Image (cartoon, helix red, strand yellow):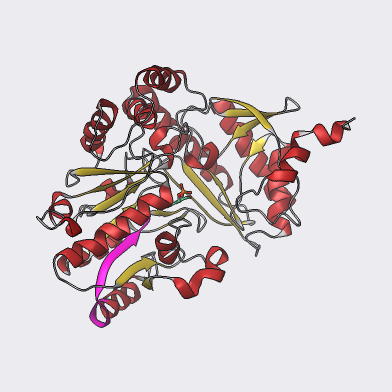
Amino acid sequence: MQKDSEKSLQHRDSKHIWHPLTQHQTADAPLPIVKAKDALFWDDQGKEYIDGIASWYTAMYGHCNDEIISAVSQQMRELDQVVFTGFTHEPAVKLAEKLLGILPKNQSKIFFNDNGSTAVEAGIKMALQYHHNRGDKRDTLIAFEHGFHGDTFGAMSASGLSVYNGPFEDFFLKVERIPAPVNDNWQGVLLKLKTIIQENDCAAFIYEPLVQGAAGMKFHDADKLNEIVKLCHEEQIISIADEVMTGFGKTGKHFASLYLETQPDIICLSKALTAGLVPMSITSCTQDIFDSFLADDIGKAFFHAHTYSANPIACAAASTGIDLLLSEEIQSNISRINSKHRDYINRIKENPKIEDIRCKGVILAIDLAIEMDRYGNLRNTLYDHFMTRGVFLRPLGNTIYILPPYVITDKQLQKIYDSIDEALALV
Ligand SMILES: Cc1ncc(COP(=O)(O)O)c(C=O)c1O
């Protein structure tokens, strides 16, 4: 007979499953999660947690959202999946129309992928082939230091977080890096950028606009970023805005790129795109980029596809997600959360344990005045503290951040703030 412990989900999991971002030799057993609703989820013991990071910024309109579920269930009964090469369908076209209605005005075409990394991968390939199709040999990408763009090879090459990249660096695309423009480093950034442009054949500049998420929710200056994108445009360097994290309202505007006057040539979207329900991503581009692939020569086409491109169910979730984003309720929730964050900042900013505290839209980040490894013991102590209190936050090294679903209540938000107050006393 099987013992109870052998029947447990954790035991069965440990026998067969390899988890992402996990050192299985030392990691605790993963927590079984059985249910989620709005800003909450529950474990198998019935304990409730507030999802303080909207499950990696996906479930922004709340978990198991009734409107999304209803749109998706209806779609599932009509058309579940069909090849998107040689066929089209209403859910994809409807989504493209809605999305182009809210993206920066220069965006004109929508290309479908599976996840954030593949949206970036497609963006980089579009930029490289754009130059190739025009007979212009360009081989260098420009990216920010400490950027994060995903875990496939092109995306990893563009990322500047060595904690993830170490074993693969010898196999990367050619990338030159500039610091993100903050405070008083502008002249240095500009000089470095101009030198890189002079000394290399630069094809594209890829960046997380305004907020570098995985780097620890680090913010940079919109005006200076605008100058960089403008300079790239003057040099026919394709600008790729990776809005996988920032897209769909998190910075206060629908997209972070809308804070800039100069718009990117290519935009990568995922995460909240499908409201946390199913994986999908999009790489949008300008008419000029699209036109550079038109020719009698089939080899000039974009020969890039994913089996589940424009999956109708994912498109239905995304279309409904956009309706929710544009609703008065969600827009007023975004303002409400931002104003609560600001009140909280004013209350705790003088705490000597805080090195920096900032917010943009619904993103609140606190850098602790203490050195901490990204995956070190102190970081784990903080994580455990929050989980014990029923608050799911994942500190990035010494940065504690909140990026809650828009439907979080004031009471739930206050509980997160209280748990941070306690954490400050703890460190
Ligand atoms: C800015 C950015 N780009 C790309 C990605 C990769 O997305 P995915 O994990 O869906 O591949 C992420 C994931 O966190 C991200 O934050």
Give the quarter of the image for residue 3. top right
Q: Residue at 40% of width from left, 39% of height from top?
A: 280
User: How far across and how far down the image is residue 66, in percent?
Assistant: 46, 18
Q: Is residue 242 above or below residue 340?
A: below
Q: Nearer the viewer, residue 255 or 159?
A: 159
Q: Is residue 414 left or right of residue 303?
A: right
Look at the image and tell me in which quarter the C terminus lies: bottom right
Say which residue appears at 30% left-offset and 52% top-offset: 304
| Residue 329 among magenta residues | no
Residue 104 appears in the picture as rendered? no
Say which of 190 and 286 sits in front: 286
Q: Is residue 374 left or right of residue 101?
A: right
- Compared with 99, 407 (above or below) is above
Place of residue 81 in the rendered image (x, y in percent of width and height, measured from the top left): 37, 30
Which residue extends farthest bottom? 199
Q: Position of residue 407 (x, y in %)?
A: 48, 27
What is the number of callouts on the image? 0
Extent of the magenta region: 197-209
* Point 32% across, 40% down: residue: 253
Question: Could you say which is closer to the camera, residue 53 or residue 3?
Answer: 3
Which quarter of the rendering shows the N terminus? Answer: top right
Q: Is residue 403 visible?
A: yes
Q: Is residue 281 left or right of residue 398?
A: left
Left or right: where 162 falls relative to 279 = right
In the picture shown, does residue 157 fall above or below 195? Answer: above
